[in-house]
Amino acid sequence: MPRFRDFEPTGVIPATLLAFNEDFSIDEEATRRHLRDVCSVDGISAVAVNAHASEVHACTFEEQVRILDLTMEEVGDRLPVINGVYADGSLEAAKIARMAEAGGASALLVLPPHSIGLFGGQKRPESAVTHFKTIADATDLPIVVFQYPGAYAYPLDTLLRMADEVPTIRAIKDWSPPMEHERHIRVLQSLPRPVHVLSTNSAWLMSSLTMGCHGLLSGAGSVIADLQVALFRAVRTGDLARAQEINDRIYPTAACFYAEPFGDMHNRMKEALVILGRLPRAVVRPPLVKPEPDEIERIARAMADARIERAGAVLEAA
């Protein structure tokens, strides 16, 4: 059963990383410390696990069960936990959803199945609707739709149909380019049953938040959750000067994490946590690979430029 009933996915939601030993097994002790670190940040509204940032693509179902269990043990009484659903088949996705509800998660983050992005699957809206209905039939947990860009994106008409036919869809984690992103904010958040837009455009987060997002859900929160909270608060209160000041602190990290190749973003975040003394090692499971030494040096410079320390960012009073 969910620990936090009636949870609405809004606000600042970090997506945590997953620590591994050198033999690629899960380092539970380091993962627990990481969860405690992130969830100690004042102002976050929930935490996400078993998602893109935690290399869910490389984890077995049994490992996902264990990751949720240890998350609930460490932080489940403090914050709502959002569990990722990564599966190409709708029946497997429903199985993961049932597991998440039984394990105490308060919401689901549903990643797009590859059938949506391959061979024009996004042109069959009934496929997406069927996928989410199958998940919703398995659990009453609120659903966050992970909206990827490009071929994996659900067209807005499809999102509207999904929101209408699957009432438990409460938010989208939106990775869309600027014009589509703003349209999603204006349309989805204005529905009779609003669907919150959570930004995952962390490479240009301030611009995204000023469009009116109801929150953000980002892997970068595993490193800079305190800066994200400060930025979100400044934008919500209309304090442009403060928002710009905080964004100047975030910029070196965004330029570092989201450089090409874009797929190395979470590898870089792990290296940042090692540099900061928050993780013992930055092991990623294949096919992901460790950054080269010169890139690790750039990550260290970015952390220094952003003035981030072991305990977090040094935030001066407004």
Image (tube, grey):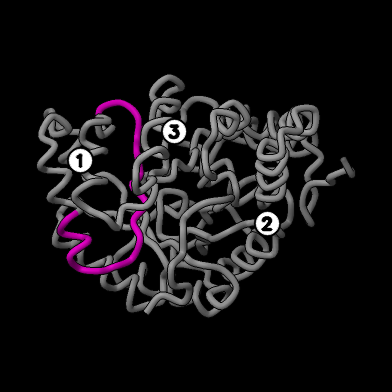
- Which residue is denoted by mark 1 in the rendering? 161
Label 1–label 2 contact, CB within 8 A: no
**Residue type, numbered disc 3:** Ile
Count of marks overlaid on the render: 3
In the picture of the structure, the residue carrying the numbered disc 2 is 43
**What's the amino acid at mark 1?**
Arg
Q: Residues within 10 Å of mark 3 (few under 14, many from 20)?
A: many
State which quarter of the image contains the N terminus: bottom left
Sequence order check, earlier mark of 3 and 2: 2
Which three-letter amino acid code belongs to the residue tagged 2? Answer: Gly
Regarding residue 136, the answer to whether it shows in the image is yes
Q: Horizontally, is 32 left or right of 182 in the view?
A: right
User: Does residue 104 appear left or right of residue 133 in this picture?
Assistant: right
Residue designated by label 3: 185
**In this rendering, does residue 258 appear at all?**
no
Label 1: how many residues lie within 10 Å, few (<14), some (14-19) or many (20+)? some
Coordinates of residue 118 in the picture (x, y in percent) = 16, 33
Looking at marks 1 and 3 on the same chain, the residue that comes earlier in the sequence is marked by 1
Q: Seen in the image, is 166 located left or right of residue 103?
A: left
**Which residue shows up at 81% across the image and 40% down it?**
307
Magenta stretch containing residue 202, yes or no? no
Cα separation between marks 1 and 3:
16 Å
The span picked out in magenta is: 133-151
Give x and y (percent) for residue 295: 62, 32
Q: CA distance from mark 3 to mark 2?
A: 22 Å
Q: SS of the residue at dot 1?
A: helix
